[in-house]
Image (tube, rainbow, N blue to C red):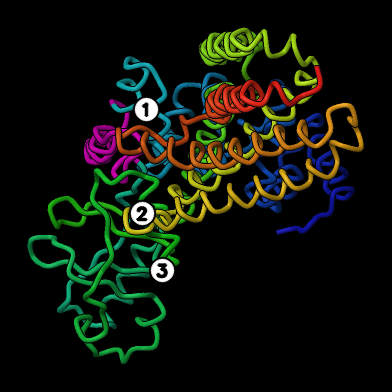
């Protein structure tokens, strides 16, 4: 397999594309299969439809299956439509069951049934079973291609099986031990198997305290468990019976998916982050949030309107409105990010919520104090006509605003989680608008109370 820097990769790619133009089968296969599978995918995505048609002729279905399973869903749909039906069926039949299920789950019922009908009955049943699990659960992302052994097997027998069955398994780093009822009773690592005496029984070297997840376990929880224990794979059970495993490559996809989803929620752009969607689709997905925030913005305008007399009396108060609003929104968003990240990673749970809220409140108080002191020093120099009274109003307002905003940013996602909703829906723009409103109320209330002491 060749290792290439950016410049050499471009030159190497040009050589491969030239073999497609020349229809040179031998040179193409020699160059193409020297590439890492990820680079093969990049090449496939970079060539024209006509050049891809040559690749389909030069690459066998079982070889193309290795490439196809690593593609994004939208690319899979595009390329499968370019393949001849028999070739496409052979490609799917050579993919792991979980990858087949993921792909077929994105197709129409008629197309899905067509591909299932062309598969071997036993393999089709495996895929159908995977398709039955709810999305974003361990069952939906697991693979059923693993190796299980009996506790009474000997090391030498298991090693012999590995030589035969390993090519069909998703991973062999862990071997799962089951009893006669197929219930999970232990696990053996490949390392322990290799260094054990050949005649030793599996029950003598296996670990019996096995960490597993259920088929209905949320995929985020599966990711947390694998991260905590540094697993390369984790067994999935249904009522104690081993039914599959989730591997680290699946979890990496889950982490990317969940991160993108949470980022979309926090920024109120859920579903519109994908650079491949059209402007109309992106606008349609963002519009509900923008409209809702627009109405909340009217409340902000209403708050300013309620204190119109205060503003007319001391017009310089309007100068500090952006400062109060921006500081409130920024502080709340920071607290939101800290809490959502903690919930996602599992570092914030019921036992640590009190400690976390206490810390965030303390953080808000200190931030407010630092900012208030800074303003008490700066404002009299920048706006001498307002004097210390104006500086005190702005500084004290900011102190209370930042303390309040930090708590809002920390508590809203916790409340939402209690309602069994993804905490990330407590989006930054939503919390920012709430904090803007409260910040203005605090600011103008203090200013109105001290209006007589301000220069008119």
Residue 125 locus on image (x, y percent): 22, 37
Q: Nearer the viewer, residue 181 or 292?
A: 292
Q: Of the residues under marks 1 and 3, which one precedes in the sequence?
A: 1
Main SS, magenta residues: helix
Residue placed under numbered mark 1 in the picture: 105
For disc 3, the neighbor class at 10 Å (few under 14, some 14 to 19, many from 20) is: few
Residue placed under numbered mark 2 in the picture: 349
Mark 2: secondary structure: loop
- Residue 126: image quadrant is top left
Mark 3: secondary structure: loop
Magenta segment includes 134: yes
Q: CA separation, marks 1 and 3?
A: 29 Å
What span is in magenta? 117-140
Q: Nearer the viewer, residue 274 or 259?
A: 259
Residue placed under numbered mark 3 in the picture: 173
Q: Nearer the viewer, residue 404 or 43?
A: 404
Q: CA separation, marks 1 and 2?
A: 34 Å
Magenta segment includes 105: no
> Residue at 33% of width from left, 89% of height from top?
196
For the C terminus, which image quadrant?
A: top right
For disc 1, the neighbor class at 10 Å (few under 14, some 14 to 19, many from 20) is: some
- Residue 113: image quadrant is top left
Mark 1: secondary structure: loop
Which-is-in-front pick, marks 3 and 2? Answer: 2
Residue 16 locus on image (x, y percent): 79, 40
Q: Is residue 185 left or right of residue 393?
A: left
Q: CA separation, marks 3 and 2?
A: 32 Å
Residue 26 in sight from this viewpoint: yes
């Amino acid at each position: 397999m060749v290792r290439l820097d950016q410049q050499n990769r471009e030159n190497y790619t040009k050589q491969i594309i030239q073999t497609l133009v020349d229809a040179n089968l031998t040179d193409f296969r020699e160059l193409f299969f020297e590439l890492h599978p990820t680079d093969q995918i990049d090449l496939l995505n970079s060539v024209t439809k006509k050049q891809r048609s040559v690749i389909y002729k030069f690459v066998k279905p079982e070889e193309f299956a290795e490439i196809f399973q690593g593609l994004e869903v939208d690319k899979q749909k595009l390329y499968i439509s370019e393949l001849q039906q028999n070739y496409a069926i052979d490609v799917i039949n050579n993919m792991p069951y979980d990858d087949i299920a993921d792909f077929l789950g994105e197709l129409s019922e008629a197309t899905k049934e067509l591909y299932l009908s062309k598969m071997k009955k036993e393999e089709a049943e495996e895929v159908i079973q995977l398709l039955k699990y709810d999305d974003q659960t361990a069952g939906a992302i697991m693979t059923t291609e693993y190796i299980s052994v009996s506790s009474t097997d000997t090391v030498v027998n298991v090693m012999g099986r590995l030589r035969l069955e390993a090519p069909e398994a998703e991973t062999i780093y862990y071997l799962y031990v089951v009893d006669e009822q197929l219930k999970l009773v232990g696990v053996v690592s490949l390392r322990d198997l290799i260094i054990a005496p050949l005649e030793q029984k599996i029950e003598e070297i296996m670990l019996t305290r096995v960490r597993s997840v259920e088929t209905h376990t949320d995929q985020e929880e599966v990711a947390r468990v694998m991260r905590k224990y540094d697993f390369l794979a984790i067994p999935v059970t249904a009522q104690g019976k081993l039914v599959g495993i989730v591997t680290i490559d699946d979890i990496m996809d889950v982490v990317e998916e969940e991160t993108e989803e949470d980022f979309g929620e926090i920024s109120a752009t859920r579903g519109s982050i994908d650079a491949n969607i059209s402007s109309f689709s992106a606008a349609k997905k963002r519009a509900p949030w923008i409209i809702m925030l627009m109405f909340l913005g009217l409340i902000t305008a209403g708050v300013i309107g309620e204190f119109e007399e205060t503003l007319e009396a001391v017009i310089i108060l309007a100068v500090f409105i952006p400062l109060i609003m921006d500081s409130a929104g920024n502080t709340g968003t920071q607290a939101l990010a800290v809490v959502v990240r903690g919930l996602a990673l599992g570092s914030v749970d019921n036992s640590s919520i009190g400690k976390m809220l206490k810390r965030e409140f303390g953080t808000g108080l200190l931030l407010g104090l630092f900012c208030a002191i800074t303003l008490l020093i700066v404002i009299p120099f920048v706006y001498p006509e307002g004097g210390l009274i104006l500086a005190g109003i702005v500084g004290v307002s900011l102190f209370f605003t930042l303390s309040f905003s930090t708590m809002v940013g920390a508590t809203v996602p916790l409340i939402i989680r209690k309602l069994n909703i993804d905490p990330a829906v407590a989006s930054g723009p939503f919390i920012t608008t709430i904090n803007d409103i409260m910040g203005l109320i605090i600011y103008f209330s203090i200013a109105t109370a001290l209006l007589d002491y301000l220069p008119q």
